[in-house]
Image: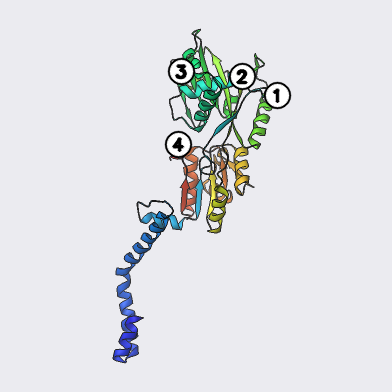
């Protein structure tokens, strides 16, 4: 406009001035566009720096701004990341030191990544038990690390009578699958279908209260197959429940509301179970009418998967590979996807 005005006023030929102004604009645009884009990205990074966010690559601002789907893990992002062991029950729902002692042995002696659950168990045991005595009475022999297929982990310890004890903790269905006995009132009995259903019902009730529940089992003098391996995780004696509380962040509800106003769809991708996720989802105002489990995604065509991923906002009991698969499907559908997670299962 400035070139047009100056040219028109000085030469008096407004048609020529218009053509010259357009030619100037066409010439300037390619040279000026990178400057304009970079200036805007720098402005964006300065704005974000005011909110304590460091931008290392300018181009990421553009991706960040064009994101229309945010996929997030639940633990530590929607929740406070302060897991507390609320209850350590035997199968009669009484708090017993034996349950806490066995869970302490499992959490203390495992050398993999000590997650929040292990830290919560160790903290609770140090507050309620004589952990120095326990450490003196037991010696670690071996361990079978956690993986996302088994959803359990085991430690083998030896007591002062030189008995080997395999102590295993894990998700309910996976623990029930490798157990054949229960310890109730000090007596060991076979695990029958009624007890199995009773255990699942009690876990479900605790889940409805927002508690994450882990089952605990053990076996004395396990016969190792060569060296201890997942083959030894069988014929376990179920001894009790560990119930953990991980409350939602105070800021989560407001953040999700703000994202919705900005036109960003939020999808929860978690390895946790449905009942706990529903409880947290309700508290933070998420749409949880439809929930898919990891097993629902198996043996589906790409078209079916794309439809499921678009239609649902909450996915539970996912493996790390399934989380990555969901993000790939969203990207194939033309979405720019942001992802937030803080656990080992978010690495892929």
- Mark 2 or 4: in front is 4
User: Residue 4's x, y, as percent?
Assistant: 34, 84
Q: Residues within 10 Å of mark 2 (few under 14, many from 20)?
A: some
Residue 176 locus on image (x, y percent):
60, 25
Q: Which residue is at a point 61% across and 19% down the rendered structure image?
A: 180
**Image quadrant occupied by the N terminus:** bottom left
Foreground mark, 1 or 4? Answer: 4
Q: Earlier in the sequence, mark 1 or mark 4?
A: 1
Circle on res. 220: none
Q: Are marks 1 and 4 in contact (CB under 8 Å)?
A: no
Q: Earlier in the sequence, mark 2 or mark 4?
A: 2
| Residue that numbered label 3 is attached to | 228
For marks 2 and 3, give the CA distance: 19 Å
Image x and y of residue 211, in percent: 61, 34
SS for callout 1: helix
Q: Secondary structure at mark 4?
A: helix
Earlier sequence position, callout 3 versus callout 1:
1
Cα separation, mark 1 vs mark 4, equals: 36 Å
Residue at (65, 19) in percent of width and height: 191
In the depicted structure, whether residue 16 falls above or below residue 70: below
Can residue 237 be seen here? The reply is: no
Image quarter (top left, top right, bottom left or bottom right) of the C terminus: top left
User: What is the C-alpha distance between the residues marked 4 and 3?
Assistant: 24 Å
Say which element carries label 2.
Answer: strand
Mark 1 lies on residue: 194
Residue annotated with mark 2: 180
Q: CA distance from mark 3 to mark 1?
A: 31 Å
Going by the image, does 244 lie left or right of 55? right
| Mark 2 or mark 3: whose residue is earlier in sequence | 2
Instruction: Say which label, 4 or 3, has the lower sequence index.
Output: 3
Check disc 3: other Cα within 10 Å, few if <14, some if 14-19, many if 20+. Answer: some
């Amino acid at each position: 406009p400035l070139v047009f005005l100056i040219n028109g006023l000085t030469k008096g030929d407004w048609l020529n001035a218009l053509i010259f102004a357009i030619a100037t604009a066409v010439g300037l645009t390619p040279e000026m566009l990178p400057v304009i884009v970079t200036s805007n990205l720098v402005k964006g990074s300065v704005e974000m720096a005011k909110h304590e966010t460091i931008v290392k690559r300018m181009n990421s601002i553009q991706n960040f701004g064009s994101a229309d789907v945010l996929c997030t893990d639940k633990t530590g992002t929607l929740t406070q990341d302060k897991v507390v062991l609320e209850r350590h029950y035997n199968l009669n729902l009484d708090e017993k030191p034996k349950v806490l002692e066995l869970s302490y042995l499992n959490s203390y002696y495992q050398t993999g990544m000590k997650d929040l659950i292990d830290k919560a168990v160790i903290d609770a045991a140090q507050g309620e038990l004589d952990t120095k005595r326990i450490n003196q009475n037991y010696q670690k022999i071996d361990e079978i690390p956690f993986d996302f297929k088994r959803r359990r982990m085991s430690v083998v310890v030896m007591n002062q009578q030189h008995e080997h004890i395999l102590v295993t903790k894990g998700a309910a269905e996976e623990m029930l699958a490798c157990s054949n006995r229960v310890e109730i009132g000090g007596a060991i009995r076979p695990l029958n279908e009624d007890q199995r259903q009773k255990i699942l019902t009690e876990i479900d009730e605790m889940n409805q209260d927002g508690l994450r529940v882990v089952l605990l089992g053990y076996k004395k003098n396990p016969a190792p197959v060569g060296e201890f391996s997942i083959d030894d995780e069988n014929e376990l004696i179920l001894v009790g429940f560990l119930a953990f509380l991980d409350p939602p962040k105070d800021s989560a509800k407001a953040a999700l509301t703000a994202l919705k106003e900005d036109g960003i769809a939020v999808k929860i991708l978690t390895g946790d179970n449905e009942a706990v996720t529903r409880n947290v989802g309700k508290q933070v105002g998420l749409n949880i009418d439809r929930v898919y489990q990891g097993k629902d995604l198996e043996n589906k065509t790409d078209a079916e998967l794309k439809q499921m991923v678009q239609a649902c906002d909450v996915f539970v009991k996912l493996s790390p590979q399934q989380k990555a698969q969901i993000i790939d499907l969203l990207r194939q559908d033309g979405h720019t996807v942001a992802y937030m997670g803080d656990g080992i299962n978010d690495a892929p």
